[in-house]
Image (cartoon, rainbow, N blue to C red):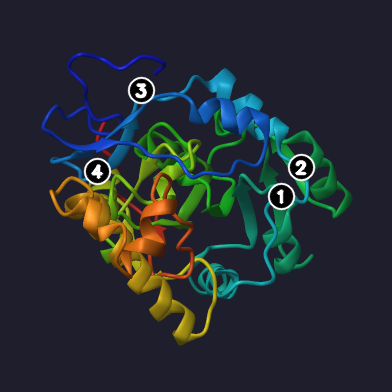
Amino acid sequence: MSAENANPSCPSCQGSALKKIGFAVCVSQFETDAVADLAKMNTTLYRCLTCRLVFRLPMPSQEILDRVYASMQADHWQYTEPIWWHWSREAIDHWAPDGKVLDIGCFRGDFLGYLGSRYARFGVEPNEKAAAVARARGIQIVGSTLANADQLPQGSFGAAVLMDVVEHVYDPRRAVALLMTLLRPGGVIILLTGNSDSWPARLSLPFYWYLGLPYHLVYLNRRYVMWLASELGLDLVAWRTLAHEKAPWSRRIRQSMGCGLYASWHHWIERSPMAGIARRIPPYSSVAPHASAPPLFMRLKDHFWAVLRKPLTGAKSRP
């Protein structure tokens, strides 16, 4: 969707009962010129009152998103064995019918490399530089986008992984429904993404870093995942909340306090008659000069990790 409709609707359930959250405010620094250009697009954040998805409108075209992802360097997203990799490997070993794993948005194949060669490892990746690194690690790249995945044999994978990926798709329901067709009975879909029902998000939106990244299109939460599971006949077998970056408690406390200060500034103080005075008084004297863009509070507990399982037999998704 490239232009905002006068009568907006949810991209996932098509519901028209929406709550307007406000205009999206982007972060101040961007990885590439293509991302900076995307950030110039004026968008509004909504929460669907039916399925509870949070999303932005208008959404950029696929052509623009392809240009953004192609502009990233192959060393852009780097992780050092985060805890959710361990959880995901355990989930595959425990629930998946086999070790054939499809990683959507695998980038360099870091997670698949972590799994090791005893798993059959397949990836989908739009960035050709990163995909080349993944191929060199023995990972079979089967497409550049999720749309390519419908050409794969149905019922051929034990697990599908969308870690730091589902927020980039137009419609998570459609993406998960497609992945369901690729899974064997009992197969699992593993999600890691931002949690729009976390306290920092609920306190701060629309002024929050997660949707301040202009290529993040949707923002999930537990209620949406439960709706999704019900719609598609899946079982939610695991759910955990976490921070995206590990940090000592002292730093998390400082970021929690900072989040509260920035939120109170934008929601109340900035528009009050006391704003001029508050700008000169601590702690708002340190907040106001930097309040035009949301800070990257990445050490707060604002993400979730979840496992959805396809039934062994029987249940079918709704059309």
The secondary structure type at the circle numbered 3 is loop
The one of 268 and 45 positioned closer to us in this rendering:
268
Alpha-carbon distance for marks 3 and 4?
25 Å
Measured Cα–Cα span from mark 3 to mark 1: 26 Å
Q: Residues within 10 Å of mark 2 (few under 14, many from 20)?
A: some
Q: What residue is shown at x 28% (from left), y 49% (from top)?
A: 205
Secondary structure of the residue carrying tag 4 is: helix
Quarter of the image that includes the C terminus: top left
In percent of width and height, residue 269 lies at: 19, 54
1 or 4: mark nearer the eye: 1
Q: Residues within 10 Å of mark 1 (few under 14, many from 20)?
A: few
Q: How many marks?
A: 4
Q: Please give the residue where the numbered disc 2 appears in the rendered image.
A: 73
Q: Can you give x and y, in whole percent of width and height, for residue 174 in the image? A: 39, 34
Q: Residue at x 26, y 56 (%)?
A: 265
| 39 displayed left or right of 223 | right
Could you give the CA–CA distance between mark 1 and mark 4, rounded to whole angstroms? 35 Å
* Foreground of the two, 106 or 7: 7
| Residue on which disc 4 sits | 231
Q: Give the vertical position of 226 relative to 271 (above or below).
A: below
- Mark 3 lies on residue: 58
Residue 42 % position (x, y): 38, 25
Label 2: state its secondary structure: loop
Residue at the far right: name it. Answer: 136
